Amino acid sequence: MLPNLIKHILSSEAQSREVEVYGWVRTKRDMKNLVFLEVNDGSCFTSIQCAFDRSFGFDAKTEAALCSVTTGASVKISGKLVPSPAAGQKVEVAAFSLTVLGEAPAETAGDIKAYPLQKKRHSLEYLREIAHLRPRTNTFSAVARLRSRAAFIIHRYFQERDFHYLHTPVITSGDCEGAGAMFQVTTLEPSASAPDYSNDFFGRKTFLTVSGQLEAETYATAISRVYTFGPTFRAENSNTARHLAEFWMVEPEVAFAELKDDMALAEDFLKYTIKAVLSECADEIAFFNTHIEKGILENLHHVAEARFTHITYTDAVKELERTAAKNKSLFEFEPRWGCDLQSEHEKYLTEKIAEGPVIVTDYPKEIKAFYMKQNDDGKTVRAMDVLVPRLGEIIGGSQREDNLEKLILRMKETGLRHDDYNWYLDLRRYGTVVHSGFGLGFERFIQYITGMANIRDVIPYPRAAGQAYF
């Protein structure tokens, strides 16, 4: 049997029953005859207090452990669960046995440095330097628990709606976004001459995927509803609080669905997921609302209950241009038709103009990917971005181009090789259908839910330019 988790012990009714506590020492208070250890196992925020009363006498092993145990040490404690006289906790452990399973020295000795998480506040920047230990803090254990639950909620949402979970390849020969910022995968030795990829492991030039969308389309046009949830990679040398080189994407794809259906699915998905996280991670959300960003709880409830405003890209730019004309110093980037909306524009649309979530549609085709369905005006595509207050874009999607000739022409315009995508074009040659989908960056979603300022703090081991130590 697995040991009881502290969260289950704390929820028990105190009946003087014997319990065993496993965890890591958060604090130690030694008061002559009384020693109090606060022990946490990461299953919840609350530590359990274990009280040792020396007046009852302990064996030599336990007494030695009480003298030597320090913050960070892993322990096994046996005792009785009893009502706690202290405020703020219902039960505690009247302990009679302590075993130190793993020491955590408080001072540097030889090659072993002092345990770096002593009882004080540490900056998030410092904690990134010890990413292997930061899960032991309240902030990062809360992120880990919420991230785990949010992933489960996302799977539950799609599974309950007859979507099939699809494992798309991590190694691919195609560039879904046409952006070119891809990590190459090769077994060839570096050479001054042009490499012959026919001699490479896969026999052609291959990369780490930037999206599972194209492969998801092949299955959506066979089994109707699919979704991917896996790692994706971008080789953008961008050292910002919003970018990672490795991140996770949620990408549903639906056959026989137009843009309006895609928009409805994205709104319902976002509302469902936020509501479920608020309900099922209430303690973690309360912590983030108090200690990370005040007001996120109210903001999340607002988004979960709000009516999403729909506006075309053209109308959105007109609104931004009118605002910029009145206040020329408001935006760092001048809004104009044809430019990609910046975060400052997206936040203004949600926080000032719509005062809530916004779905922007019908973007200029030049700033969107080749696979998006072209509108009759020849200038715009049936794309949509879901924008939320505080963050800006949280979901991006589109109706996919189902016309073979138009898709081939668009690929030529964007410089993509026809032969590299023959398999993708077959979906339009054989039984083509209207289909749509969207993508949600999982880390960006977790960042939005928690209020964490830097995206590198919502993934266990962040990968960015120059950062792959752990």
Image (cartoon, rainbow, N blue to C red):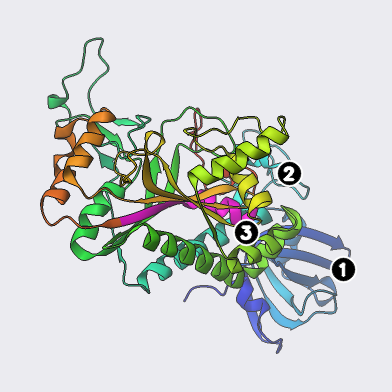
In the rendered image, residue 302, in percent from the top left (x then y), is placed at 65, 64
Q: Nearer the viewer, residue 343 or 420?
A: 343
Rendered view: 109 above or below 27: above
* Pointer 1 or 2: first along the chain: 1
Which of the pair 318/14 is nearer the observer? Answer: 318
Q: CA distance from mark 3 to mark 1?
A: 35 Å
Judged left or right of residue 440, residue 131 is right
- The residue shown at (67%, 35%) is 324
Magenta-drawn segment: 436-451
Give the mark nearer the N terminus: 3 vs 1. Answer: 1
Label at residue 142: 3
Q: Which residue is at 30% across, 38% downward? A: 370
In screen coordinates, is 187 left or right of 398? Answer: left
Sequence order check: which comes first, mark 2 or mark 3? 2
Three-letter code for the amino acid on which mark 3 is drawn = Ala
The local secondary structure at tag 2 comes to loop
Residue sitting nearer the eye, 408 or 394: 408
- Residues at badges 1 and 2 in contact (C-beta under 8 Å)? no
Q: Amino acid at mark 2?
A: His
Say few, some or many: other residues with alpha carbon within 10 Å of mark 3 (under 14 / 14 to 19 / 20 or more). Answer: many
Number of marks in the rendered image: 3
Q: Gap in Å between the C-alphas at discs 1 and 2?
A: 32 Å
User: Is any atom of residue 167 visible in this view?
Assistant: yes
Q: Where's residue 360, x and y in %? A: 49, 50
**Is label 1 or label 2 in front?**
2
Q: CA distance from mark 2 to mark 3?
A: 16 Å
Q: In screen coordinates, is 187 left or right of 267?
A: left
The residue singled out by tag 2 in the image is 122
Pointer 1: what residue? 33
